[in-house]
Image (cartoon, helix red, strand yellow):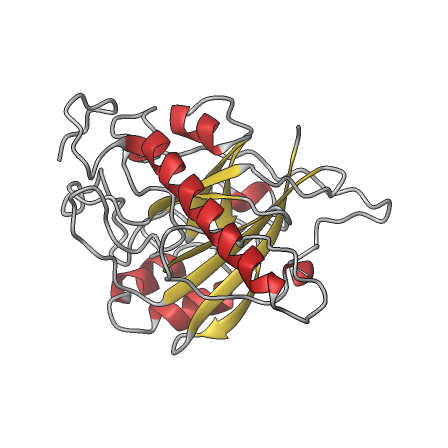
Amino acid sequence: MSHDPHPHDLDDHDLGLEHDLRVLSARLNRRRLLAWAACLGATAVGCDGGAANDTGDDAGTDLADTGNLDTGNRASDGSCTEIPAETEGPYPGDGSNGPNALALSGVVRSDIRTSIAGATGTAGGVLLTVQLRIMDTGCVPLPGFAVYIWHCDREGRYSMYSVGAEDENYLRGVQVADDDGVVTFTTIFPACYPGRWPHIHFEIYPSVEAAAAAEALVKTSQLALPEDACDAVFATEGYEASVANLAQLSLATDGIFRDGSNLQLPSITGDTNGGYAIQLDVAVPI
């Protein structure tokens, strides 16, 4: 797989994020038309023809009403504390350090477990649904903002970089915040590799166009996975190496989270059989 962040010979399956935007727009328009048509014959109150955050695929786990997202960062004065900035690490896949997942067709998606643009790998592991509500420090949702997330696989490897996964691009994807500022991703629970607490990286952009160009970055940060869930997941098949790695770490000693992780620890529900769902409010400056 070429690591050229700006490939010159793109085929129909690798036309980049800008091409995805046109396709996504067409799908959204069609979906709205169908919703409006259904409303003409409906008797239910509140039918407005709005479209959900369409991703072009049907995978993903529906979570509870977004009004119930974690609000642990909301102060008594009604403001929301800005999430800490963190390093993107050595494997961002945004073109700043080698390969660029944002240039791949299909990267705008909710289910990030499979590779795209000609790569065929699928990341195995315990199902994890990630739901973030993007808002400003006044707790006002930011619809239209784009979130790019990435993390390691069950073996602790990062696609596009790590040996054995360098030709894959799974566990990377972009979502656009809906009217409530919410993005939702379907993925797998990441491993714990030596020296780092289990985590998920993300970048926030003011629009999906800005994400496509990797410009006007609003915030780079990380989510910390709750310890109880880590213990349960790492007891399952395929995560064996994570058990010993986690035993050497704590949030208080992790190089990223040791200065405080309360704004980066999501609420969590679920189990290893049906999968987990994590939710977090993420406040950013605008």
Q: Is residue 234 above or below residue 141?
A: below
- Is 149 displayed left or right of 8 in the figure? right
Residue 79, by quadrant, is: top right
Outermost residue on the right side: it is 77
Outermost residue on the front side: it is 41
User: From the image, which quarter does the C terminus lie in?
Assistant: top right
User: From the image, which quarter does the N terminus lie in?
Assistant: top left
Q: Which residue is located at x 54 percent, y 59 percent?
A: 37
Give the total number of marks visible in the rendering. 0
Residue 269 placed where, x, y %?
Answer: 54, 70
Q: Which residue is located at x 32 percent, y 61 percent?
A: 242
Camera-side residue of 282 and 251: 282
Residue 85 placed where, x, y %?
Answer: 55, 33
- Is 51 displayed left or right of 81 in the figure? left
Q: Which residue is located at x 38 percent, y 35 percent?
A: 22
Camera-side residue of 271 and 49: 49
Is there any visible trace of residue 103 in the rendered image?
A: no
Q: In this view, does 186 lie above or below 79?
A: below
Residue 141, by quadrant, is: top right
Camera-side residue of 33 and 255: 33
- Is 39 displayed left or right of 23 in the figure? right
Is there any visible trace of residue 213 in the rendered image?
A: yes
Residue 245 placed where, x, y %?
Answer: 33, 57
Camera-side residue of 55 and 94: 55
Outermost residue on the bottom side: it is 273
Residue 83 placed where, x, y %?
Answer: 62, 40
